[in-house]
């Protein structure tokens, strides 16, 4: 009996240790899950508060409309409209014309923005700019000016009879109305370039600085000049930064609102529904049609999401 008892004791040892080890692993896993939940909880709370809740409220608003009863003396009541607000928005010529304006804006703005910011970043990276930090500050400074202030500054510079720029042009025999119907789109593009080209330039310059210097030196040793090195070496290596800024630029173009809203006070070429965002604003705060405003906003958001996906896929395919 004593020999059996002696043989049984060691067998119980590893089994107890295994249970203890498994329990320790489970406690460690619970601690890790708790820590992950604790750190991620603020993100999900903010995500739900600033994105999911407003989006859900907009969807709910877009499904209802206000209908007046009788001859309008009985007040209005909220009725379920289903998809009518979406169909009415898509059928509205003012909403569709807003996208034509956005298309023209993108055709001017995106090449000038991306090309100009890339050129400035390459010049700074090449060392041709001797006072590099000074130029970085000067080019980035307009971005820290709030958009509404920038639009007010440029409206003053565009306004005939007040602007020193218009006065200087007229003294030189050049008559140029920045706020006329056929030139106001270029004036809006100019404001956006002034605000954002320095911001994108900083992103490109940081990406260029991350390129290993050995790669550039190897290109120089192989006989490539500065232009060929920029086109064949530097630009392909910062493709990710270019795709990212192009994505932000397209989304920002769809959200065009502040600049034309300010210029609308001085230009007959900018109407209250000039862009899709201005259409939604007018429907909500001038016509009190919150259902159609929500529908227009959601359609615009869907288009932005689709374009973002297309640009991201295009960038990933070219980078592969």
Image (cartoon, grey):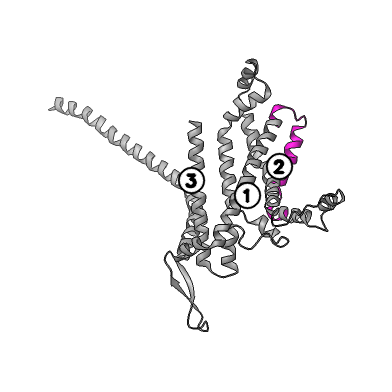
Instruction: Give the Cα distance between marks 2 and 1.
Output: 22 Å
Classify residue 216 by image quadrant: top right
Secondary structure of residue under mark 3: helix
Name the residue that disc number 1 marks. 105
Q: Nearer the viewer, residue 320 or 9?
A: 320
Q: Indicate whether 160 appears above or below 308.
A: below
| Contact flag, marks 2 and 1 (Cβ < 8 Å) | no
Query: First in sequence: mark 2 or mark 3?
Result: 3
In percent of the image, x 63 and y 56: which residue is there?
A: 257
Name the residue that disc number 2 marks. 140
Instruction: Give the Cα distance between marks 1 and 3.
Output: 42 Å
| Residue 195 picture location, percent across and down | 69, 47
Classify residue 8 by image quadrant: top left
Look at discs 2 and 3 and give the one toward the viewer. Answer: 2
| Residue 49 picture location, percent across and down | 50, 57
Query: First in sequence: mark 1 or mark 3?
Result: 3
Q: Main secondary structure of the magenta part?
A: helix
Name the residue that disc number 3 marks. 39
Q: Indicate whether 302 appears above or below 245.
A: below
Query: First in sequence: mark 2 or mark 1?
Result: 1
| Residue 139 picture location, percent across and down | 73, 40
User: Which segment is the magenta one?
Assistant: 124-149
Q: Is residue 24 left or right of residue 282?
A: left
Look at discs 2 and 1 and give the one toward the viewer. Answer: 1
Q: Is residue 170 left or right of residue 29?
A: right
| Residue 200 picture location, percent across and down | 64, 40
């Amino acid at each position: 009996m004593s020999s059996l008892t002696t043989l049984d004791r060691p067998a119980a040892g590893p089994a107890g240790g295994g249970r203890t080890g498994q329990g320790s692993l489970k406690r460690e896993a619970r601690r890790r899950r708790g820590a992950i939940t604790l750190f991620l909880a603020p993100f999900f709370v903010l995500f739900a508060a600033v994105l999911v809740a407003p989006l859900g409220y907009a969807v709910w608003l877009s499904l209802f409309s206000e209908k007046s009863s009788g001859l309008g003396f009985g007040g209005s009541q909220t009725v379920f409209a289903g998809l009518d607000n979406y169909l009415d928005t898509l059928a509205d010529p003012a909403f569709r014309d807003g996208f034509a304006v956005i298309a023209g804006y993108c055709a001017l703005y995106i090449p000038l923005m991306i090309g100009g910011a890339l050129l400035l970043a390459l010049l700074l990276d090449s060392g041709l700019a001797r006072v590099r930090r000074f130029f970085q500050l000067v080019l980035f400074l307009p971005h820290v000016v709030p958009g509404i202030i920038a639009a007010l500054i440029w409206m003053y510079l565009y306004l005939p009879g007040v602007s020193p720029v218009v006065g200087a042009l007229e003294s030189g025999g050049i008559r140029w109305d920045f706020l006329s119907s056929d030139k106001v789109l270029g004036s809006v593009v100019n404001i956006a370039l002034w605000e954002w080209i320095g911001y994108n330039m900083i992103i490109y310059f940081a990406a260029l600085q991350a390129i290993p210097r050995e790669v550039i030196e190897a290109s120089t040793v192989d006989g490539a000049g500065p232009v060929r090195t920029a086109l064949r070496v530097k630009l392909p290596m910062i493709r990710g930064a270019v795709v990212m800024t192009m994505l932000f630029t397209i989304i920002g173009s769809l959200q065009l609102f502040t600049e034309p809203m300010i210029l609308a006070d001085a230009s007959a070429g900018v109407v209250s529904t000039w862009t899709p965002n201005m259409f939604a604003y007018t429907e909500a705060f001038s016509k009190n049609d919150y259902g159609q405003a929500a529908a227009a906003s959601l359609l615009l958001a869907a288009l932005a999401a689709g374009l973002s996906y297309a640009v991201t896929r295009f960038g990933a395919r070219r980078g592969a």
